[in-house]
Amino acid sequence: MTQDFFQTFILLVLVTDPFGNVPLFASVLNPVPPARRSRIVVRECGIAFVLLLIFMFFGRHFLAALHLSEVALRIGGAVILLLISIRMIFPHPDGVLGRTDGGEPFIVPLAIPALAGPSALATVLLFSSESTGEVMVHVAALAAVAVVWLLVFLSAEKLQKVLGPQVMTAFERLMGLILTAMSVEMLLSGIREFVKTL
């Protein structure tokens, strides 16, 4: 149970990539008055958490309504993870999530897709197919990840100043490398399940 918690926790931290998103949060919140920044961070993290929680509990019904198999979702999620992880390792001028507009953010781009992006949604949808006990472990892991989001983004400006851009870039690339391995494993697992159904 504890191992499952930590595996889920690490996977969700890698998928949502809070440390890699520090530059995005810092740049998007830059034009916002300092007094409002912490409120926006809490609001956006809360929206992302609720959305991922909804997908975790109602993911099975969502799949059934769209006539999607869990194998297809696993393979599709793995492909998305792989593409995102490659972009983390080989940075793009527009960033991992593409170009964003200025102004005070609301839901986009911080809650979605920075935190609750396609890869994160696909990941928690997979958790919805497990037993009740395992789902509770996954909910606890998601809550712990949400706390990490808050801690990281509330101190985003300080982190950038203390660590510097080079260390932040190196950390993001390391996370991208780990996420690449996890996405390949997820893809191979999906392919194995698909082969069994033939």
Image (cartoon, helix red, strand yellow):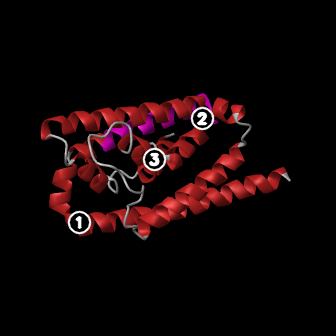
Choose between 190 and 66: the one closer to the eye. 66
Residue drawn at x 58%, y 39% is 125
- The residue under label 2 is 128
- Helix or strand or loop: what does disc 2 sit on? loop
Horizontal arrangement in the rendering, residue 40 relative to residue 112 (left or right): left
Disc ID at residue 12: 3
Q: Which residues are magenta?
A: 128-149
C-beta proximity under 8 Å, tags 3 and 2:
no
Where residue 132 appears, x then y in whole percent? 59, 28
Horizontal arrangement in the rendering, residue 111 relative to residue 22 (left or right): right
Dot 1 amino acid type: Pro
Disc ID at residue 165: 1
Q: Main secondary structure of the magenta part?
A: helix
Residue drawn at x 49%, y 59% is 84
Q: Is residue 43 above or below residue 173?
A: above
Horizontal arrangement in the rendering, residue 44 relative to residue 12 (left or right): left
Dot 3 amino acid type: Leu
Where residue 188 appears, x then y in whole percent? 67, 60
- Quarter residue 182 falls in: bottom right
Residue drawn at x 59%, y 56% is 78
Choose between 38 and 131: the one closer to the eye. 38
- Helix or strand or loop: what does disc 3 sit on? helix
Whichever of callouts 3 and 2 sits on the residue coming sooner in the sequence is 3
Q: What's the distance in space between the residues labelled 2 and 1, CA to CA?
A: 37 Å
Residue drawn at x 54%, y 61% is 82
* Front: mark 2 or 1: 1
- Helix or strand or loop: what does disc 1 sit on? helix
How many neighbours does mark 3 have within 10 angstroms: few (below 14), some (14-19), or many (20 or more)? many
Residue 108: in magenta span? no
- Quarter residue 174 falls in: bottom left
